[in-house]
Image: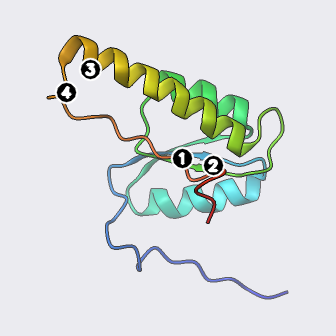
C-alpha cells in the first residue's frame, strides 16, 4: 500500500481561526482532514451526510465547507445547492434591512456541479 503525505504548508493562508465544516460519509477521511485543520488552528465540525451538513450550516456560519460528492441522504452537490439557496435568501433579507454597506458573510462549498475540482 502506498503512503500519501499530506501537508498544509503549501497553503498561502493558514486556516487558523477559520470555522470549517467537513461533510464526508467516510469517518477516516473526515478524521484525517479535521485533524490536519485543527492542528493548524481551525475550528472544525464534522457531518456524515449532506442532510446533517445542511442542518449544521443553517444554525452556524462557516468560512469554508468541504463537501464529499457521494454521500447518503443528500449528495454533496444537492447539499451545496440547498446551502447556497438558503444563504442567498438570507443575504437578500440582510441587504433589505441593512443595505449593501455591511460585509457579506462568506460561506464556501467545495462541491457543486460547476466548481468540482
Q: Are marks 4 and 3 in contact (CB under 8 Å)?
A: yes
Location of residue 7 in the rendering, given as x and y in whole percent from the top left corner: 51, 77
Q: Is residue 100 above or below residue 44?
A: above
Residue marked by disc 4: 100
Earlier in the chain: of badge 1 and badge 3, it is 3
What residue appears at the point 73 percent right and 51 percent down from the top-left corner?
69
Q: Determine the CA span between mark 1 and mark 2.
A: 7 Å
Location of residue 93 in the rendering, given as x and y in whole percent from the top left corner: 35, 15
Residue marked by disc 3: 95
Q: Determine the CA span between mark 4 and mark 3.
A: 5 Å
What crowding class fits label 4: few (fewer than 14 Cα within 10 Å), some (14-19), or many (20 or more)?
Answer: few
Q: Is residue 30 above or below residue 76?
A: below
Earlier in the chain: of badge 4 and badge 3, it is 3
Which of the two discs, 1 and 3, sits closer to the camera?
A: 3
What crowding class fits label 1: few (fewer than 14 Cα within 10 Å), some (14-19), or many (20 or more)?
Answer: many
Q: Secondary structure at mark 2?
A: loop
Q: Determine the CA span between mark 4 and mark 1.
A: 23 Å
Looking at the rendered image, the quarter that the N terminus falls into is bottom right
Location of residue 24 in the rendering, given as x and y in whole percent from the top left corner: 71, 49
Left or right: where 58 falls relative to 13: right
Q: Determine the CA span between mark 2 and mark 3.
A: 25 Å
Question: Residue 15 versus residue 95: which sits nearer the camera?
Answer: 95
Q: Is residue 54 above or below residue 49?
A: above
Residue marked by disc 2: 112
Q: Determine the CA span between mark 1 and mark 3.
A: 22 Å
Residue marked by disc 1: 109
Q: Are marks 1 and 2 in contact (CB under 8 Å)?
A: yes
What residue appears at the point 62 percent right and 36 percent down from the top-left corner?
81
Earlier in the chain: of badge 4 and badge 1, it is 4
Amino acid at each position: 500500500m502506498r503512503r500519501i503525505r499530506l501537508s498544509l504548508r503549501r497553503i498561502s493562508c493558514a486556516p487558523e481561526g477559520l470555522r470549517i465544516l467537513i461533510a464526508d460519509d467516510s469517518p477516516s477521511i473526515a478524521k484525517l482532514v479535521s485533524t490536519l485543520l485543527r492542528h493548524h488552528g481551525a475550528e472544525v465540525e464534522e457531518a456524515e451526510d449532506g442532510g446533517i451538513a445542511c442542518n449544521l450550516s443553517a444554525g452556524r456560519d462557516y468560512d469554508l465547507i468541504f463537501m464529499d460528492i457521494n454521500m447518503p441522504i443528500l449528495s454533496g452537490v444537492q447539499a451545496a445547492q440547498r446551502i447556497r439557496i438558503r444563504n442567498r435568501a438570507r443575504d437578500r433579507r440582510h441587504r433589505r434591512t441593512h443595505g449593501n454597506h455591511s460585509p457579506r458573510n462568506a460561506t464556501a462549498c467545495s462541491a457543486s456541479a460547476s466548481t468540482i475540482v
